Image (cartoon, rainbow, N blue to C red):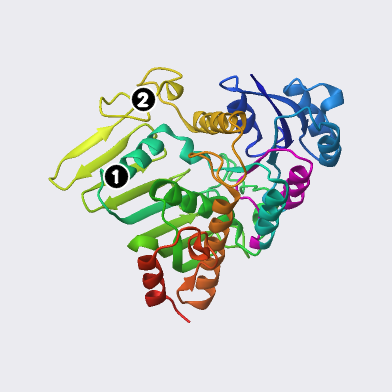
Amino acid sequence: MTLQLGVIGGSLNSAVGRTHQIAAEMDNRWEITAGCFSRNADINRMTARDLRIPENRNYRDWRDLLESERGHLSAVAVLTPTPSHAEIICHALELGYPVISEKALTSSIEDGEQIIKAREACDGFLTVTYNYSGYPIVRELRNLIRAGRLGTVLHVQAEMPQEGFLRLVSRENRLPEPQPWRLRDYEIPTVSLDLGVHLHQLILFLTDRHPLQVCATQQNTGLFTGIVDSVQCLARYNEGLTANLWYGKCALGCTNGLRIRIFGSQGSAEWYQQNPEELRLHDNLGGAQILTRASNTAEICCEGRYSRFKAGHPSGFIEAFANYYADIADALQAGMGANRVHEYLSTAEDAVEGLRMMAAINRSAESGQWESVRETAWSSGMFPSKTDSDEFVMHSTS
C-alpha cells in the first residue's frame, strides 16, 4: 500500500524540499498528495503544480492543511526552517498525525522537550531525518561494530567541513547568499544545528554511546560576521569512548567533507561521504580491506533494498534519503510506537540529546572549560551502568 504524505515547507526554492520529494517517492512507498510549501503564494502554487498536487489540497496556511487533511494522510513531513518546527510539530501530533521532521528537530532544548511531551501525551509517532545513516555502507559499518569486528570501540574522529561561508559564487565573485535564518545564532549556534547534530547522530547510530562532557572552541572566520561558523570539540562518552568533532563552513576545498573514522582495540574503519560506497577497514595484524556492495563479506549493504542498480553504479545522497523513507514506511505499517520507532530511525530523544551536546559545546567555548552534556538519555537513567556512572563522577567538573 502506498502511503499518503503531506508536506509543510520544502518549496522549489528550499534547500531540502526537492530531495525529500524525490526520496519519498523513489521506491513507490509514498505519494505526496497535499502540501503547504511556502508562505509566498506564488512559490506555493508553483511547487504544488510541479508536484501535481490538486488546487484543493494545496494550502496557504499549514494550520489549514492539518485541520483539513485529518484522516487522509499517513504522515506529515515538516521541512520548514528549524526555528519554526516546534509549533507545527506539536500541533500535528495533537491532531494525531505521524510526523517526519527534518533535522535539526528544534533550535532550543526547551522546544525539543515540549515536542517530546506532546508526543507522549498522544502516544504519537515522530522521527527526525538524519539521512547520512541511510547510506548502506554506514549501516554495514554499524553491523560490523555490533558484531565486534573492531573490538572495543576506543575513539572516533568525526568531521563535516564545508566551504559555503567563504567560497564566492560564479565567475562574477558574488558573495554566497545563505537563507536568512542561517545567518542568525539562537540558543545553539546555527552551524551546530546544521552540521554538528549530524555528527552526534552518526556517532550514536554507529556506536550506541552517549556524550557525557565536551571541551570546545568555536570561531567566526567567514564572510558573515556575528555568527559561529567553525567548531572544534573534544568529547567524552560513556564506556570510555572519546571523540574529536570538527565541523564548519569555512574550509575551502570541502564542498561537504563528511568523514568518520572509528578506532577499536582490534581494528579501525573509515567512511568518506564523497566516496560513499567504500568502507576502508584495517585490522590488528596489519591487514587492509576495502568493503563495497559487491564484497562477498558484506552482510547489510548488499541487501536487495539497497541495490536499485547493480554494484559499481554508485548510490548516493538522495538514495540514502529514500532508504530512510522506506524505513519510516516500514515502521508506520508495522504500527511501531512513539519512543522506539525502528532500529534505523532517530527518535525525538536522540535529537534532543544532540541539542544538549551542541548547547554544551557552546557553553564550553564561552567558559573555556569542560562542560557536562546534562540530562542526556544516558545520564537520566535510560542507559544505566555503574561503571559509566563512576567514570562520569571522576571526570566531571563543578
Q: Is residue 227 visible?
A: yes
Number of numbered callouts drawn:
2
- Judging by the rendered image, the residue that carries numbered circle 2 is 302
Report the span colored magenta.
84-109
Residue 248 belongs to the span the image colors magenta: no
**103 within the magenta span:** yes
Residue 113 % position (x, y): 66, 58
Residue at the extreme bottom? 398
Horizontal arrangement in the rendering, residue 185 relative to residue 230 (left or right): right
Residue 145, compared with residue 305, is above or below; it is below
Crowding near pointer 1: few (<14 within 10 Å), some, many (20+)?
many
Q: Earlier in the sequence, mark 2 or mark 1?
A: 1
Badges 2 and 1: C-beta atoms under 8 Å apart? no
The answer to which image quadrant residue 70 occupies is top right
Q: Residue at x 63, y 65 (%)?
A: 226
For marks 2 and 1, give the CA distance: 18 Å
Q: Is residue 107 visible?
A: no
Q: Which residue is mark 1?
A: 269
The spot of residue 320 in percent (x, y) is: 49, 32
